[in-house]
Image (spheres, grey):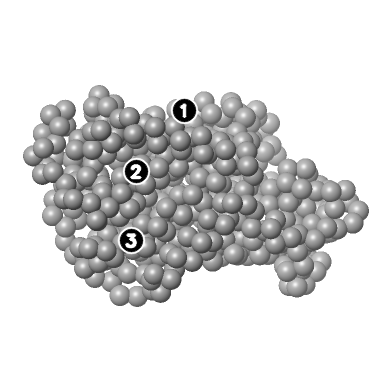
Amino acid sequence: MSETLRTLPEPVAVPASAPTEPAAPAAAEAPRDAAAEAPRKLKRSIGVVGGTLLTLSCVTPASTLFVVVPDLFSSLGTATALTIAIGALLCVGVAFCYSELGTLIPSAGGEYAMVSTMAGRLAGWLVFVLSLLVVMIVPPVIAMGTADYLAPVVHLDPSLAGAGVMLLATLAGLLDLRANAWITGIFLVLEVVAAGVVAVLGFAHAERGVSSLTDLSVAAGSGAGSGSGSGGGTETVTAMLIVSGLAIALFVTQGFSTAVYLSEEMENPRKNVARTVLLTLGISAVVLLVPVAAITMGAPDLAALTSGDIGGMVDAWAGSGVGTFISLCVALAIINAGIVMVIQNSRVLFASARDKAWPAPVNNVLSRLGGRFGSPWVATLLVGVPGAALCFVNLDTLYGVTGVSVTGMYLLVAVAALLARRGTHGHAAAWRMPLWPGVPVVLIAVLAYVLSRQEPEYLLWTGGIVAAATLYWALYLRPRRDSRWLVTVPGE
């Protein structure tokens, strides 16, 4: 993979339009409410190691293994490992798109900055809305799982525990990013150890061979969210059910995109963004898939596997002491995920204000940086505090909306990657994906099909939110196209 380094000029705010649109007005025509000051920049303070620790922590393999994967076991049974493997394979193509676009547009805006620049402002705005859905919903959903894994030590109300995790993550998010990289790195070691112990125990107590990973069976009468199944016969997992489960499988590994949100704070982003994205995806896929395969092979029977009670299986394999250790590691992993997600999500909100997505007073407040640590402290509070409040809301439907949102977001990123070599962007020095344009074309087709197989309820919820966002675009952003929704491309 060839890499070329290029130094960009100092940050300039330019309207995010497709390359085929007329040239944007000069920066001098920026609105008076922009205060005629240069766009605020985040400090470049992390390299590949720090970025990989933070992005791996956002994938948080242990918390997804113990919180999200049990739901997949309940609906997909022995097909869970295969579904996650297919999702990881799709994510390789997505990672290629993120790597190329992230080195062309190293902005804290992440997906929306990349898509706005390559595919036009409306597409970028819709990507921002989809990403905002994901970043606001996922942290509290995962945080509420803390109570289950602290149960061997103390019994807590899930909502209160989740709110506490979100507030703790918010406080940590106000610190310097380099400090957070080390904090999350320590927690990451613990969760990888937990996943490794589960993998060793599962393989050591294997009840069936490797062929069970392709048996595609689930306990009769189970289904998503129904618990342990009937304990009787088996049902075959259909191809359509696997396709439907791919939205959650994509969500399980989607944290690798965090590298793009951190690209503005990475040293030498032209080289380090691609390395971090691809390295994170590879490590997280292994850390997640190996324990899933081990659990599939080591479960006492199909009903136990379909129940998704990983903690119960660990107790049966090694005793309650080891089970307690694993549970505490998972609880720390969830806290770790909360910290990283608040960091990531606050950068998105900060970048949207800096790029003038909102009325001037809102932009001025959201783009404020702390004097000591240089973190976007207002945006951090506005992500973390509402996240704590969401822990007291039933998020079952919103959890489904998250899967749809992630798939739709990846679809628009693939479209942007297909357009990334038009005009001047085609000659810019950047990391370039192999097999272009085949990779984005295949991704667009597959992701569109996956979206079409999702539950109508989740599609309607997401579609309604996208429609409202489009209305905001038509009534507020588009009439002010010379002064609103201007993507900032920072210099190195």
- Dot 3 and dot 2 residues touching (CB under 8 Å): no
Residue sitting at x 78%, y 44%? 227
Residue sitting at x 23%, y 38%? 481
Amino acid at dot 3: Leu
Distance from disc 3 to disc 1, alpha carbons, whole Å, reads 36 Å
Q: Classify the position of the C terminus by image quarter.
A: bottom left
Which label's residue is closer to the chain start, 2 or 1?
2
Residue 432 picture location, percent across and down: 32, 69
Distance from disc 3 to disc 2, alpha carbons, whole Å, reads 15 Å
Q: Which mark is residue 386?
A: 1
The quadrant in which residue 414 appears is: bottom left
Q: Which residue is mark 2?
A: 122
Q: Which mark is residue 419?
A: 3
| One can see residue 44 in this view | no
Amino acid at dot 2: Leu
Which label's residue is closer to the chain start, 3 or 2?
2
Compared to residue 325, the image places residue 386 above or below, namely above
Secondary structure under tag 2 reads: helix
